[in-house]
Image (cartoon, rainbow, N blue to C red):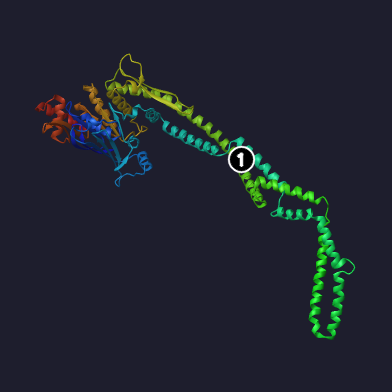
Amino acid sequence: MLCELEIRNFAVIEAARLEFGAGLNILSGETGSGKSLIVDAIEAALGGRVSSELVRSGAEKAWVTAVFSELPVQTAELLLALGLEPEADGVLVVNREIEARGRSLGRLNGRVVPLSSLREVTASLVDLYGQHEHQSLLRADRQLELLDAFAAEAVAAREAVAVLNRRLREIRAALGGLADEREAARREEIWSYQLEEIGRADPRPGEDLELEDRREILLHREKLLVLGQRAYDLLYGGNGAALDGMGVALKALEEAAGLDPHLQVPARDLRGCLEEAKEVARDLSRYLETVEADPGELERVEERLEGLRELKRKYGAGLAEVLAYREKTAADLACLREKQEQAGEWREEERRVENALMKAAAELSARRRQAAGELSVAVEAELESLGMGQAIFRVEVSAGATERTDRVEFLLGANVGETARPLAKVASGGELSRVMLAIRTVCSRPAAPAGLPTLVFDEVDAGLGGKAASKLADKLKGAAASVQVLAVTHLPQVAVAGERHFLLEKGTEDGRTVAGVKLLQGEERALEIARMLAGETGAKALDHARELLDRGMAG
């Protein structure tokens, strides 16, 4: 709800402050008093296009500040998205600053924001009907919302379609995060081959180093055999072998140690040397057996080394890295296969959700098409009571960009013989105001939308009088039962229906034209109603005005 509007140096308004209330707020004044400037100021606060020529002559800047309370949920969400929150008392302060040199600045709760953000946040707060930009009725999405609100159960059906649409997007996003079938198959084939290749080789950590050592031995086999055999023969295997001589020497030393205890230690040391020499001889014997291995071993070692080198070339610098690669690839392959199974489940759910969505969308579309005809007839009847008896109003529902969306368009033929055409192309400000008022009246049943918190009507009473004026007043008051309404009017029948009445006056101060605004109360309001009735404030006009006010307040 628009609680307060403060204006400074805006055209002929030097300073004005209006405190609006819930229900119907009336703005009246003589022709040329500047009534529409209030609407222009509201539009400026909402981020509409403004000219620097609106800055009061001699001033550097113009300011418009609008204070809103009881913010819709979507407005609060948009504020949070911008890093802002409502004030402590739950209000939003919107400020627009217009410089005479052409620069324009917007603020939300004191923080400077781009005008696009200002427009986005305030779009759900106010709707203007007249010669203004902020007319949601001209937007296809708003027309769709109004039709859905009118159609029985369409709002719930639309939410069901939205839920299915969101789920379908989630599923497709999940599928998009998985590799496509061809890519998955390619990866599975490559990883399976790599695991098989490493598995066939089945390398052991350090095996390549062991084989390199063995290869060196096999390459020098002949020389090692000759040298090893010679050492073995000299030590143990031939005539005059060292071990034989050491055995004779030990026997002699042990016999001598029996005679002289001092020789026991040398005898013991020699016995140790003899045992060590025997162990060396045994080691040499075993070594010579290994060197005398299969002559084809060298070829096999070379082949194995080449195979291991190929693995290292493909999968890692060493066998430890090759084995780590095998472990990782096995895990990746298992994960891929799990995702492939998951993708199958996602695709199955995608088919189920898509079928359910198509069915729900078809049901919603059918409800909309039925409601479109009913809404057309109902609005036409309301327009007749608002002085547009020759008007043709149509609601067209057609297929949108995809098979699951509908496109709704409101068409109007305002005059006899005119073909109904889109509202944006044919409706004047006053006609657009009456169409919206007619829709609000038709949608006054419980299923109707709450709509925007504040509706501003300018020129809605253009060309009306008599019974049509009274019916217009009733409809404005009816609309104001669920939303705040501001109406610029010249009709006394409309003015007396308001809970609050503001008067726009224009005068001269210090040789300059100045427009002011004041809230009328008591006899002041009766005087304004009298002026609107008869153009003067004589006794008869005042009596008639009081009578109208009493009736309007009682109604």
Q: Which of 480 and 234 is in front in this view?
A: 234
- Residue that lies at the very extreme toward the top in this rendered image: 417
Q: Quadrant of residue 528?
A: top left
Q: In which quarter of the image is residue 136?
A: top left
Residue at disc 1, secondary structure: helix
- The crowd level at tag 1 (other Cα within 10 Å; few <14, some 14-19, many 20+) is few
Residue 271 is left or right of residue 194, and the answer is right
Q: Looking at the figure, which quarter contains the C terminus?
A: top left
Q: Can residue 85 be seen in this view?
A: yes
Q: Can residue 555 be seen in this view?
A: no
Q: Which of 58 and 410 is in front in this view?
A: 58
Instruction: Tell me where residue 260 appears, x and y as whole percent.
Output: 82, 86
- Residue that lies at the very extreme toward the left in this rendered image: 539
In the depicted structure, whether residue 46 falls above or below residue 196: above
Residue 543 is left or right of residue 257, and the answer is left
| Residue at image point 85% right, 71% down | 243
Instruction: Tell me where residue 68 appears, x and y as whole percent.
Output: 28, 39
Q: Looking at numbered disc 1 in the image, what kind of residue is underneath it?
A: Glu
Q: Nearer the viewer, residue 304 or 234?
A: 234
Q: Mark 1 points at which residue?
A: 341
In the depicted structure, whether residue 411 falls above or below residue 331: above
Q: Across the whole image, how many numbered discs are drawn on residues?
A: 1
Instruction: Tell me where residue 400 appears, x and y as whole percent.
Output: 45, 26
Residue 116 is left or right of residue 492, and the answer is right
| Residue at image point 21% right, 22% down | 466
Q: Looking at the figure, which quarter contains the N terminus?
A: top left
Residue 495 is left or right of residue 312, and the answer is left
